[in-house]
Every structure is written in structure tokens, then in C-alpha cells.
Amino acid sequence: MSVEHQPTPRGAEQSHAELEALAKEQLEKLATTPENAAEHAEKRAEAAREIIHKQEQAPDPVPVAEKETAAPVPFVARLDQLTNYTHTMASLQRKLRPMSRSFSKVIHTPAVEKTSEALEKTVMRPSVAAGATWTALLVGVIFYVTARIYGYALSGSEMLVALVIGGILGVALEGVGRLLRRRG
């Protein structure tokens, strides 16, 4: 049989007195620490004045005309981007099926990517591709139907000419669209 020890009222009074004594000691310590003293506040203010004074003595900034307009990207940043890109590509390619992985490795070689980007900015822009496709489709259908009805023989260059004309029309329509957007 276990007997629980219950504190007596005298013990509670004694512990209460001890807590009050500890609290007084802590308050005295807090009052004497430099964090709460006016001296410490004065020291902090003096340190702040010194920092401000040092900033005022700093040399005048270089005029904007003398500064470089665009700082070159540090080599480390470019290396980090390249490393990040290669790790991401390798991680994604590991998740692909073997045939898709092989195709991905081929189309993501630097030579193929540079060629693709160059074509994307010139010949294979969406306006050129869409114009060439639609024009070739329409001209091809018209020529084929006409040749079929009247018995003409097609030479084969009709589609090539239609693709070129369609590309030119696509670029022209894109330019007109840009002009209208500027004015609007």
C-alpha cells in the first residue's frame, strides 16, 4: 500500500516564501544588467552614431555614366545553371522508357538545341509555319481538284511554291497584327 505524500500547509508556506525570495533576486539581477540600464542604451546610441558617421564618410558613388550598364554573369552562376540543367535532364530521362530516353538524349544535345532555337527564331516561327501549312493545304487542294477535273498533269513544284508563298503571307500577317496592336 502506497502512501501519497501530501504537503502540509507549513510546507506550502515555506515553498511560497522561497519562490518570493527567488523572484526578488531575479528582479534585482534584471535591474542591474546593462540591457535594462540607461548606460547600455547610451552605449547603443553611440554605436549607432558611429555607424552613421562611417556611412557619411564613405566615398561618393560613381556617376551612372561611368558605371557598366550590364555586369557580366559570373562564371560560377553560369556553371551552376548548366549543372542544374544537366542534373534535371538526367533525372527526368531516368524516368522515361528506353526508347523515349534515347530520343530525349539525341534532341537535347547542345548542337540540336542550338539549331532548334535558331530555326525557331527565323524560319519555324509559328506565323511562318501556320501560314505555309494553310496556304499549301488550300493551294494543294485547289490545284489537285483542278488538275483532276480538267486532266492536267501536276509537276510537283506546286506544293513547294505554296509553302514559300504561305510563309511570306504568315510573316506579313504577323507584321500587320503587330502594327494594329501598337496603335490599339
Image: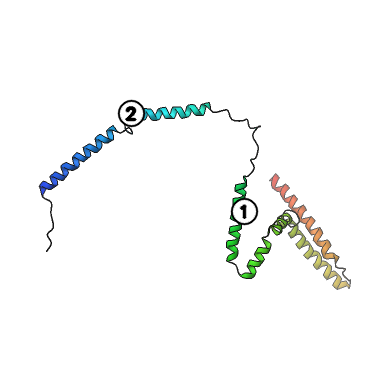
User: Residue 19 bears which disc, if any?
Assistant: none
Q: How is the image coloured?
A: rainbow
Residue identifier under label 1: 82
Q: Nearer the viewer, residue 112 or 130?
A: 112
The three-letter amino acid code for the residue at tag 1 is: Leu
Q: Quadrant of the N terminus?
A: bottom left
x 84%, y 67%: residue: 143
**Does residue 65 sit above or below 176 in this rendering?**
above
User: Depth check: 159 or 22 in front?
Assistant: 22
Toward which corner of the image does residue 98 lie, by quadrant?
A: bottom right
Please report contact status of discs 1 and 2: CB closer than 8 Å, yes or no: no
Residue 38 bears which disc, if any? 2
Identified by mark 2, the residue type is Ala
Is disc 2 surrounded by few (<14), some (14 to 19) or many (20+) residues within 10 Å?
few
Closer to the camera in the image, 116 or 171? 116
15 left or right, relative to 143: left
Above or below 114: residue 41: above
Q: Residue at x 71, y 58 (%)?
A: 111
| Above/below status of 82 relative to 154 | above
Q: CA distance from mark 1 to mark 2?
A: 56 Å
Picture coordinates of residue 85, whole percent (x, y): 61, 56
Identify the secondary structure beneath mark 1: helix
- x, y percent for residue 159: 82, 65
Secondary element under disc 2, as helix, strand or loop, is helix
